Image (cartoon, helix red, strand yellow):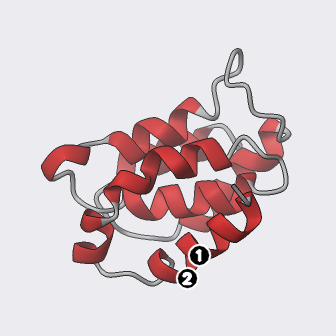
Amino acid sequence: MLPEATLGALEAVFANADKETLLRGGHYICLLHALAYDPALFERAVKLLCKFAEVPDEGNFEGEAAKAVTSLFYIVGSGTHAPLRRGICNVAAGIGQRRGPAPRLRAWLGSRCA
């Protein structure tokens, strides 16, 4: 697998996707979660996971994106190598202004950046 190319392809499809496209692409959540473990891809993968998390919970992927994002920020045992504060603050800044169905995720990320 080519992680950079894979993430680039997912970004090309989902970065500006509508709700229906995001719902159909929910099976990529696990792949994005795995890509986030690469320090060079962390912020981009989390940003795309947050995009999935903003879609109302429907179908088979109910809450999976939000769970995938929060699991990357556990203080102990997340396994990511990205600096915790940098990652949290950058992600919180990226989604803090959006309105959508993921207010708990935004609040959780934002509270760790204060």
Residue drawn at x 47%, y 44% is 30
Q: Considering only vertical position in the picture, is 15 above or below 74? A: below
Q: Assess disc 2: are there few (<14), some (14-19) or many (≥20) residues with their C-alpha within 10 Å of its C-alpha.
A: few
**Which residue of the protein is positioned furthest toward the front in this rendering?**
1
Q: Residues within 10 Å of mark 1 (few under 14, many from 20)?
A: few
Q: Which mark is residue 9?
A: 1
Q: Looking at this view, name the residue that lies furthest to the top.
A: 76
- Residue 87 % position (x, y): 75, 48
Which secondary structure, mark 2?
helix
Which residue shows up at 66% across the image and 37% down it? 112
Residue 53 coordinates in the image, percent (x, y): 38, 54
Q: Amino acid at mark 1?
A: Ala
Between 2 and 25, the one lying in front of the other is 2
Residue 80 got which mark?
Answer: none
Return the residue at label 2.
Answer: 12
For the residues labelled 1 and 2, the Cα–Cα distance comes to 5 Å
Q: What is the secondary structure assignment of the residue under circle 1? A: helix
Q: Residue at x 48, y 39 (%)?
A: 68
Residue occupying the point 83% across, 47% down: 39
Q: Quadrant of residue 25?
A: bottom left
**Residue 13 point in image, percent of width and height:** 47, 80
Q: Position of residue 27 (x, y in %)?
A: 35, 53
In this rendering, position of residue 87 left or right of residue 69? right
Q: Please state, as top left, top right, bottom left or bottom right, where the C terminus lies in the image.
A: top right
